[in-house]
Amino acid sequence: MKETDLHFFIDSTLNYFDEVTREKAQTGIPYIKSQDPVVLDYTGIIGISGKRKGSVYITASQDMLINLAQLILNQSSVSNEDVKDLIGEIANTISGNVRQAYGSDFMISVPVVVEGHAKDIRMPDDVQAFVIPITWRSFQSFLVVCLE
Amino acid sequence: MAQPVKLMIVDDSSIIRKLIQNYLNEYHIEIVGEAGDGKSAVELFRVLRPDLVTMDIVMPEMDGLSVIDEIRKIDPNVKIMVVTALSDKSTGIEAMKRGAKSYVVKPFTPDKLKNAFVKLLQ
Amino acid sequence: MDKLMDNLTEQFIGTAKDLNLSTEYLIGLLGQVDIGLFFLNRQGIISGQYSASLPQILEEENLPDRPFLDILDGRIPDKALRETREYLDLMLDREHDEKTIDELNPLKAIEVFSKNESGLWSNVKNLCIAFRRYNMEDTNIALVGLIRDHTASVELAKKLEEFEKWSRKQMQWMISLLHIDIPLLKEFVAVIEYELGRIDLIIKSTQKGAEYTAIIPRLVRSAYQINSSAVILNLDFFTRETFLFKNEINELKNLAEPSGHDFVPIVMRLGNMHSMLKEIKDLMKHIKGLDHSLRTTRRFDGGLIIRLVENLINHLTETTGKKIILKYHDFDYLGIPFKYRQIVKEFIIALTRFVIEFGIESAEKRKSLNVNPFATIEIASELSNNIYTIRFRHDGNLIRIERILQQAVNENYKGTDNAPVNDESIHPGSEVLRLFLNPDITMLENRGTSEGIEIMNDFEIVKKKLKIHGGRIKVTFTSESFCEYTITFPVIGQSEPPAQNSQ
């Protein structure tokens, strides 16, 4: 992975929150993912193929997703299905937007959603994964990018 | 009073489908159907024959560009607004070549969607 | 009439039998070939007849009556799909010469993607798809398609190329590592691991924007340690990376309010260094003798100290334009008490850096002063009256430190010093230097170049360690002849070192 890859994903993430919520999110200092799991209540995973291969996932707490869904849908209550759907949609949007930089050779899959605190999301052993901490309102979530 | 525009929403995300519905509710439209995958979208279109379709691209079963091909075979005059996270130009061009009349990139603000919708109707 | 009917019926049955036989033969044939063979009509739709291996190659089950382009849609880049459509249009138009159009086939060597059970893109195949016009009249078949799966050979070629590249790199690294003594290498790995881990922890635990600026000095310190360790061992392939790493951190210092974004180059560089360290550790497994005990003989370790200093001098003289000769014939490395081995090494290295940065002039400057352009550093030692003494002497005359520290002395002098004051007229800056060498006095207030600050940081740490060991530092000047630093350790009452491995 190169510097520009991380920048693309950071920009895409910040743009998502800005456009959807009209409230700025902050990204923290990215770090290399160690053996420690980076998994919160819900995780949306996108597979990447084409010129670049790997995966991208976003993981967030239920509280944050409920907050976000309520804001987006302008509803006081949201269902578990809405929350699961939202994390997949966030992963899809962030990854899809990065295509603007990479072109159509950057192929993204349909998102896969994992509910509950999984042990960890399996990433290829021989490729470094980078964790981008995201703070929106006071909620923290993580975008994990693993690209050859 | 003029007939409402019959709208079908195609997106695998229920949140996006709700969002599009919420944002376009103020217009004289009737949501005749929703589909969460490409295959269902084609089958539903065949039955419902909406005037306007909002179409996601990355979907299970059949992707949106293929769905556009299929539904235009059924009704070449249908108005299609692609609503997708794929922000690269070539996808946009491809969608337009296949017959989409409008292209909105996610994430979208209410104004962005509404403006595209109004332009499409004109 | 009946006879005619019978004849016709017989002919018809015969033809039908022949047709069935031909069909069976074709099916049998198609079942045998291990390439993908199929037929397209003028609309580009796959016919019902195709080879048995086609579904497996394309990883698609329901093929008959499907448009060929639909099979590829979403599985090859959009550009390739567009070009395929255009190519097939040309192939179906008999006005164009087939051989000429064949050059335009984008599917001659194409990657085709498939999904796994979870719906995630996973599998990729390298296929060669070729088309030929079918020139029989009165048939719906327009094109014959042939697909060969070259995935295995492409993968193999890729792997071979990667392996060659990797082997070349490993050889180069191995050659660099073999020149380094094993204990030094182990120490190097330990230092780098520690510092990289430290940086990882600092970054991971700093997620509030307000703290970003505060962590930069800590990152600078670790970067300096990493770079210094690599420089001492002359590991070029590593120092290239650490040098860039240091520069990137230094650039952060120039930002008034760094954001998470701004740390991206540093994080990527860290990633590279982690990978390199892993590879170095893997290579070390192949270096003989690594499984032996870390403990070495004094003779061995004493020799190491000199080699370290030589490496350091070589590196620093390259970058500073200074020329230095190292003399150590009076350095009795056998005599280093075990307990002080580490601190002596650290002291000599810190002092070497300190002296080269602040004490010795460039070759040009020395020439202009009618002095031998080659400066001399001399390290000597002695053990007498239960005192172990290291002398570090140099003949430089450049005490730049007084410009940095004089103001600090005036403004920030801390601690007590009851030693008699040197006469400044004998040697300018000597009083400052004496104060600087006092372990109880801290003189750093973020002045000077960052390299200079780090050198002084090292020295501060060594001073403190010396004090813990009961050591003392003294500096002696003779007028424009030499400057000598002496450290002394009490040896009496110290325990003898454990039994050593013989070399």
Image (cartoon, coloured by chain):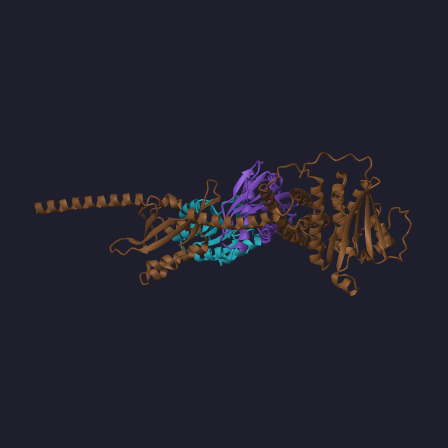
**According to the rendering, which colour does chain B have?**
cyan
- Counting the numbered discs, the total is 0
| Residue nearest the viewer, comparing B90 with C294 | C294
Furthest residue to the bottom?
A: C368
Q: Quadrant of residue A39?
A: top right
Residue A52, image x and y in percent?
51, 50
Residue C188, image x and y in percent?
67, 44
Q: Quadrant of the C terminus of chain C?
A: top right
Locate residue C72 relative to residue C39 in the image: left or right: right
Locate residue C300 relative to residue C130 in the image: left or right: right
- Residue B35 visible in image: no
**Residue drawn at (13%, 47%) of the image:** C8
- Residue C24 visible in image: yes
Locate residue B119 relative to residue C5 in the image: left or right: right
**According to the rendering, which colour does chain C have?**
brown
| Residue nearest the viewer, comparing C118 with C446 | C446
| Residue nearest the viewer, comparing C107 with C230 | C230
Residue A62, image x and y in percent?
60, 39
Locate residue B68 relative to residue C499 in the image: left or right: left
Q: Which chain is purple?
A: A
Furthest residue to the front?
A: C329
Residue C467, image x and y in percent?
82, 42
